[in-house]
Amino acid sequence: MSKTLITSLLVFYLSLFAGNLLGQEVEVELGPDKIGLNETFTIKINVSNEKIKSYDQFPEIPGFQKQGISQSSSMNVINGQVTSSNSIIQYYKPLRKGDYTLPSFKITINGNTFDFEGKKISVGDPVSSQGSLGPGYDPFADFFGRTQEEPEYIELDDEAFFSVSVDKEEIFAGEGFSINLAFYMSESNQAPFNFHKAGEQLDEVLKKIKPSKAWEENYNITNIEPEQVMINGKRWVRYKVYEATFFPFSEGEINIPSIPWEMIKYRVAKNPTFFGSNRQEDFKTFYSAPKTVKVKPLPPHPLRNEVSVGQFQLRENITELEVETGEGFNYNFGISGVGNINSISAPRRLPAPNFTTYDPNVRQQINRGYGRVSGIKEFNYYITINEAAEVELEKYFEWIYFDPVRAVYDTLKPAAKIRVVGESKVNQAISSQRLGGIYDRISGEDNKFLNEQYKYYFTTAINLLLLASVVFLAVFIIRKK
């Protein structure tokens, strides 16, 4: 092999490598300001020096209907410098004559978002196709001695479905069940799909499926991302659009009807060409199967309407502590597990002498994921004990709940023990307490027995009483005579 040939090949490969290192450049080309009713308007995105791996939907234009998307790519080698260009073209068909506005829009390409300016579009009467240089004109028709023909589009069979699924079909009141809405495509599916107004559709769907008497923990899906799943030994791609866990307040049935979900399904050109669109936008509606969740009442119990339902454990920050009488200390009663963390109430405080607590500070953390709601709720108490003793906190606190897995009521009690040492502070604690009521008003009242106004009323009452006594005595004497 000659030196000249080797050098040429090295230059070519180095140029190719350098071309790949060039930055991504994105440009937009908008169709003309004026088109006929029988023409199409286009938005063309050009990406230089990078392949188009992903992109989201093109904007809607009032008065137009999307007609399909085509892609093209090209490569140039000039003086050993390799450049490439990739394009996406969205076609729009005007629905009626008039003046319309394409607003400013954003498109995410290969994970990067780009802002583009809009424009005004005027749609007039249909124009003759002869000699037209509009978007529908084929510049190669005269060169090859043929006329442009509308491509024939066909619909491919698809392996896809839309599903509303629940993880439990029977639960206790207060127990959670998870629900998710997702679109599935098999890995062997050939039909091209895209989402159509997913947010608007979801708003309408949730009105039909949300139970009216239940607490919702929404997993807040903001991006529809593909994930690989196995169903009956077959690989599928799942796109979750909604996931939540509901905790019903009372027994009964929760009925979820069949839900429609519309997707964009593209029809493809029967005879693909390099020029023009090789697919056409169409729509297909999928329907989920209805679901029913039976909610059973909790077994009889005095606190049946107050307890939390779930699988919980007690978490304490201390196991053994020594304190002086009357000296305050902190005790943390934490409840962790799976269930409606938000509904967890404070533990019951059992009455006892010489043991003082105050309302606790509360902190909670809720985790939503893997089809369940879990977390922890902590109650931090400040406690003082005024008598020396060995104190087991299980005698002062308890928390009752219902475990739906074992179908039993259970009680969480502290394991912590407090050793209280020192002299008794019982009398000191009593003297430091406010007596309240009338005693709180003593220092603010006048030390006189009565003021002048009350003295006048008191004197008048005494005089009337004496007069009545004299009259009664006179009447008695007269009757005796």
Image (tube, helix red, strand yellow):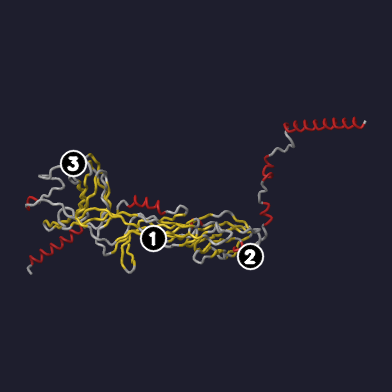
Residue at 25% of width from left, 45% of height from top? 61
Residue at image mark 3: 34
Horizontal relation, residue 299 to residue 45: left or right: right
User: SS of the residue at dot 3?
Assistant: strand
| Spot occupied by residue 295 in the image (x, y as percentages of width and height) | 48, 59
Q: Does residue 48 appear anywhere in the picture? A: no
| Spot occupied by residue 414 in the image (x, y as percentages of width and height) | 57, 64
Residue at image mark 2: 390
User: What type is the residue that disc 3 sits on?
Assistant: Lys
Q: Quadrant of the C terminus?
A: top right
Q: In 3D space, how far apart are the residues under numbered discs 3 and 2 (Cα atoms)?
A: 91 Å
Compared to residue 86, the image places residue 467 above or below, namely above
Depth check, mark 3 against mark 2: the one in front is: 3
Q: Quadrant of the N terminus?
A: bottom left
Residue at image mark 1: 165
Horizontal relation, residue 39 to residue 189: left or right: left
Q: Residues within 10 Å of mark 3 (few under 14, many from 20)?
A: some
Depth check, mark 2 against mark 1: the one in front is: 1
Q: Residues within 10 Å of mark 2 (few under 14, many from 20)?
A: few
Q: Does residue 147 appear anywhere in the picture? A: yes
